[in-house]
């Protein structure tokens, strides 16, 4: 074990340390004393961010199971951004909803550590480990409002179904080990390339089982059932964190596993991914149209977005993988921002997260309404926002591989999705004000975070070239 | 070189951002905001006039070109330029935006700051569409246009504004996303055919010879987007709703500029990029255009609502434009270009008049008026002039365009011209009948007896329109001559045979230019 092994996991260690510090801070807190625990998280994330930059391009590997390659580090960077946004936006909401602060921040940080490990792991067993670290923390976060029925119900559904999907994943892992006698991705890849012919059925079963596991985590149809309930039950900011962080980490591992270990079986899994992408986009948008609760609407929208990202995987070319990275960044920032706005609108004892309570928001909170409108338009893919460039990049990948069918489904569903994003804007700007109470003014940190989100949304929409090129270069490390 | 076009395109946006900085609690600074917005839009208008003056009318290629790398790895550039086809559309946008702002001076009281800002953002996007020579850039502006228009209809419109706004955005977005795919497809085809990388550069893509099957599908995707915007029958159903529910300023911009985008797109992108598909589909598109001419006129005839009548007359008039384009000859194309400007002036003017009437009476039903000639003589005078320009009375602008289009259509296929000509007659019927019911006869409603005549502000709104209608009717050569080289070049591109015969510099149709519309062109 060389020292470079430790180096590769420094970003994860930073976040872990912050999580432990958060727990200790809570334990040693005098009753009534206020400790800015989110600050500890920010310090840890800053450490993770700096170490990620320092690791960039050095191809450090850790213990033979973790690779700090540019692909993994790009996703870690996205996760740092998501984590930092969550830390900055949370304090006022945690206080308002009387959530247990220490546990909340510690769990968020542990989940982040799991996500980062998942993004960098190159061994199926470690991926499973990371997945569980992440998932357990997120299950608890979903249920953190113990008093509310919806929260407990959502978390319970998520936990039961998540347990099933983990079992599927583990089962698939066992098959893979049976065929390849290793769980390392490159080892599995070369074993399948050589001996695939001798166990074709077993290999296909293994891929199928792993697809179920990943499909569940990225909430692709037909494994999406838990998503709306879990997002609705969780506090808005947790839903935002889940919908972006879990998706980024799961997609990173998903892509890595598919293009390294299972590349030899591509002809078998590609049609499955194609169909999954198509029905995920269609179901996500069509059902999204019928939602009147904003969190459920955004849940279906996040399902649809999983479909768009799957296009990148189905295109199975470099452009597609670069597009996935760029899309995860754009989606992460905008979707978390949108959930944060919903979180900020809640008043004590009232969620204000249904469509009707948005009526006249542009009069009550002009700035929040404007931010929300821009973020929704970005999710809908309207230029000049980042969401447009993200979709454009994804469709480029599909067109590049000659797959006009998936691209056409993609553009048409994104028109349908514009319909439900616009409905929110209609309520905010065009409807008569309802009886929803004024929400308290957001904290300065929240305002600055949302402003930064807005700037990033426009910046990546107008001058995307540097980030596009970084994403495109980052995927080179997968091979 | 000074980036003239960039300045023109982004000046309104800067104006809009400036407006957002003005603190306006409870509308106390509405006046400041109105004047700032008007100032910004007048500045843009002046800039477009400078552009016109400095434009070299003898050149066929793009002028004032600016080109910078934008997303190098995908061959996306910031590439803008202007030729004879887009020049006057820029000027038209420059004229109509201040007019629209001025027309809403007294009718818009709610959120004046946001209203003015959206109008200026819209102007930026519209100008951007007309100057973009990179398809990615074009699509950005094209789609960005939807949002301000959506807000203008949805927030400041009439009763069913939300329905109309959502319908507007869904129709246009549905049409344009397929065009987005075709644009991406074109860029990739450029790489696989030439091997020189991906490119969204319009000039490079013009020279691309696509496989037949791709050419057809891409053409259909582009044409669908533009046909919805024009709007071509049967994609027109969003238009009456959007027009009727939009505030006057919105209607003026919608009719005056936005509808031009569709026809402009056909001329700039769909036809020259996919010439053989264009030649193949032109008869079918022309057929839809002729149906639109007659159908729009017939439906306009029976409308009880003034605004709806003008909206359907738009469907009819824009059918002429598309017919002229499909004729694929000099007369038709020039007529179409000219008719686009005419339609912007005369239909924009009609919407302004209807807006003035409805500001006075809070109704747009024809039956609620009658005998206005005695009450508001000045208003009726300009109303008459604009009505006649819309009908196409010789000496006013409408005549020149329609005449050239019919000439072009006749040369191509007399049957189209015959049916389209019936549209001219029908337009006289519905417009004059409407005019008679509103303005002549006895005053049937007592409310109408005390209506005020044109105010000073309204005079300033309508004078530019009236002046343009007369000017363009008497001196069409001023406009047609700068268009000529660009139109020639465009037709060369579209007709492959011509390209084969005379590679680059030769002009098409030498004989016809002598006998054809030359008389019209050199009249001044």
Image (cartoon, coloured by chain):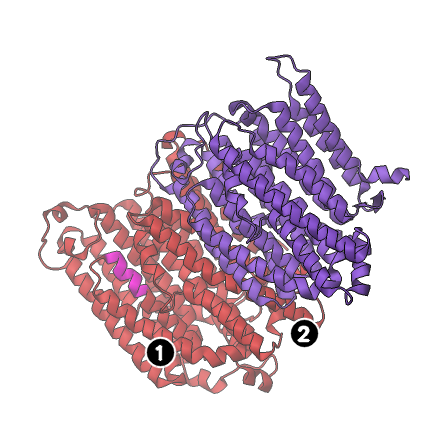
Q: Residue at x 47, y 48 (%)?
A: B121
| Cα–Cα gap, marks 2 and 1 | 40 Å
> Is B66 within the magenta?
no
Q: Indicate the quadrant containing the N terminus of chain B: top left, top right, bottom left or bottom right.
A: bottom right
Q: Magenta span has B310?
A: yes
Q: Which mark is residue B406?
A: 1
Camera sees residue B490: yes
Residue A13 - label: none
Helix, strand or loop at label 1? It is: helix
In terms of depth relative to the viewer, which is nearer, B105 or A371? A371
Eye-nearest disc, 2 or 1: 2
Magenta stretch, overall SS: helix
Residue numbers of the magenta segment:
B306-314
Disc 2 secondary structure class: helix
Q: Which chain is purple?
A: A
Residue B30 in the image: state x and y as whole percent: 38, 35
The residue at which mark 2 appears reads as B193
Label 2 resides on the chain identified as: B
Pointer 1: residues within 10 angstroms few (<14), some, or many (20+)?
many
Res B466 seen here: no
- Chain B rendering hue: red
* A254 on left or right of A68: left
* Looking at the image, residue B278 lies above or below residue A32: below
Quarter occupied by residue B440: bottom left
């Amino acid at each position: 074990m060389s020292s470079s092994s430790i180096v590769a996991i420094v970003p994860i260690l930073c976040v872990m340390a912050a999580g432990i510090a958060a727990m200790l801070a809570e334990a040693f807190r005098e009753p009534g004393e206020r400790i800015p625990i989110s600050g500890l998280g920010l310090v840890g994330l800053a450490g993770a961010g700096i170490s990620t930059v320092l690791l960039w391009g050095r191809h450090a590997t850790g213990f033979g199971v973790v690779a700090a390659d540019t692909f993994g580090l790009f996703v870690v960077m996205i996760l740092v951004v998501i984590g930092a946004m969550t830390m900055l936006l949370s304090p006022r909401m945690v206080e308002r909803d009387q959530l247990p602060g220490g546990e909340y921040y510690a769990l968020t940080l542990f989940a982040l550590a799991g996500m980062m490990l998942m993004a960098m792991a190159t061994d199926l067993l470690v991926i499973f480990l990371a997945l569980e670290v992440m998932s357990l923390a997120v299950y608890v976060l979903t249920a953190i409002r113990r008093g509310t029925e919806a929260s407990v119900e959502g978390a319970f559904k998520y936990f039961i179904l998540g347990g099933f999907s983990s079992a599927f994943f583990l089962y698939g892992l066992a098959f893979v080990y049976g065929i390849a006698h290793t769980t390392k991705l490159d080892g599995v890849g070369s074993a399948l390339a050589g001996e695939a012919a001798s166990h074709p059925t077993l290999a296909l079963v293994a891929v199928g089982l792993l697809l179920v596991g990943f499909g569940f985590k990225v909430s692709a149809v037909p494994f999406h059932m838990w998503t709306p309930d879990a997002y609705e039950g969780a506090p808005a900011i947790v839903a935002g964190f889940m919908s972006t962080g879990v998706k980024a980490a799961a997609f990173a591992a998903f892509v890595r596993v598919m293009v390294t270990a299972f590349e030899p079986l591509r002809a078998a899994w590609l049609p499955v991914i194609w169909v999954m992408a198509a029905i995920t986009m269609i179901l996500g948008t069509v059902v999204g149209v019928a939602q009147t609760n904003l969190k459920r609407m955004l849940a279906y929208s996040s399902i649809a977005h999983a479909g768009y990202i799957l296009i990148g995987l189905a295109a199975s070319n470099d452009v597609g993988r670069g597009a996935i990275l760029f899309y995860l960044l754009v989606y992460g920032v905008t979707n978390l921002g949108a959930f944060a706005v919903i979180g900020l609108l809640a008043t004590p004892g009232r969620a204000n997260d249904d469509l009707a309570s948005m009526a006249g928001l542009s009069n009550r909170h002009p700035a929040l309404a404007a931010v929300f409108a821009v973020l929704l338009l970005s999710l809908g893919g309207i230029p000049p926002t980042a969401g447009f460039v993200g979709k454009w990049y994804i469709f480029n990948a599909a067109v590049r591989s000659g797959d006009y069918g998936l691209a056409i489904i993609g553009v048409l569903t994104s028109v349908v999705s514009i319909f439900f994003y616009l409905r929110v804007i209609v309520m905010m700007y065009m409807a008569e004000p309802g009886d929803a109470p004024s929400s308290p003014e957001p904290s300065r940190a929240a305002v600055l975070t949302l402003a930064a989100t807005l700037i990033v949304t426009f910046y990546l929409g107008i001058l995307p070239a540097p980030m596009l090129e970084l994403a495109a270069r980052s995927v080179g490390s997968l091979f | 070189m000074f980036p003239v076009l960039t300045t023109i395109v982004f000046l309104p946006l800067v104006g809009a951002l400036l407006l957002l900085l003005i603190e306006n609690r409870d509308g106390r600074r509405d006046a400041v905001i109105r004047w700032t917005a008007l100032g910004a839009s007048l500045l843009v208008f002046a800039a477009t006039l400078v552009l016109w003056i400095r434009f070299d009318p003898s050149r066929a290629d793009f002028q004032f070109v600016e080109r910078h790398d934008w997303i190098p790895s995908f061959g996306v550039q910031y590439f803008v330029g202007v030729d004879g086809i887009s020049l006057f559309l820029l000027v038209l946008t420059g004229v109509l935006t201040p007019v629209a702002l001025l027309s809403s001076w007294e009718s818009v009281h709610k959120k004046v700051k946001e209203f003015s800002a959206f109008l200026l953002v819209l102007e930026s996007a519209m100008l951007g569409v007309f100057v973009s020579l990179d398809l990615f850039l074009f699509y950005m502006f094209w789609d960005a246009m939807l949002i301000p228009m959506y807000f203008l209809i949805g927030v400041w419109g009439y009763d069913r504004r939300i329905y109309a706004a959502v319908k507007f955005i869904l129709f246009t977005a549905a049409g344009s996303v397929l065009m987005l795919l075709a644009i991406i497809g074109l860029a990739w085809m450029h790489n696989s055919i030439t091997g020189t990388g991906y490119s969204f550069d319009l000039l490079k893509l013009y020279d691309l010879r696509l496989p037949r099957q791709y050419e057809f599908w891409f053409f259909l995707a582009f044409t669908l987007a533009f046909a919805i915007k024009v709007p071509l029958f049967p994609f027109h159903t969003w238009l009456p709703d959007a027009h009727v529910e939009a505030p006057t300023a919105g209607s003026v911009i919608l009719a005056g500029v936005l509808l031009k985008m569709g026809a402009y797109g056909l001329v700039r992108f769909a036809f020259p990029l996919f010439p053989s598909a264009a030649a193949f589909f032109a008869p079918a598109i022309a057929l839809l255009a002729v149906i639109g001419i007659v159908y729009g006129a017939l439906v306009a005839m029976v409308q009880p609502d003034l605004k709806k009548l003008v909206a359907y007359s738009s469907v009819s008039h824009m059918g002429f434009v598309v017919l002229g384009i499909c004729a694929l000859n000099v007369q038709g194309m020039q007529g179409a270009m000219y008719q686009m400007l005419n339609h912007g002036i005369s239909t924009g003017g009609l919407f302004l008049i209807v807006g003035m009437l409805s500001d006075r009476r809070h109704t747009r039903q024809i039956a609620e008026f009658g005998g206005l000639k005695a009450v508001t003589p000045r208003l009726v005078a300009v109303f008459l002039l604009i009505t006649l320009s819309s009908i196409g009375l010789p000496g006013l602008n409408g005549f020149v365009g329609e005449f050239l289009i019919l000439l072009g259509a006749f040369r191509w296929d007399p049957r189209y011209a015959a049916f389209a000509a019936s549209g001219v007659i029908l337009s006289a019927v519905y417009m004059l009948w409407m005019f008679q019911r509103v303005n002549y006869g006895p005053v049937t409603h007592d409310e109408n007896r005390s209506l005020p005549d044109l105010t000073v502000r309204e005079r300033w709104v309508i004078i530019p329109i009236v002046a343009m209608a007369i000017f363009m009717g008497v001196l069409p050569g001023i406009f047609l001559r700068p268009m000529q080289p660009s139109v020639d070049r465009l037709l060369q591109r579209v007709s492959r045979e011509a390209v084969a015969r005379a590679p680059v510099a030769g002009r098409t149709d030498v004989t016809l230019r002598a006998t054809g519309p030359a008389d019209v062109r050199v009249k001044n």
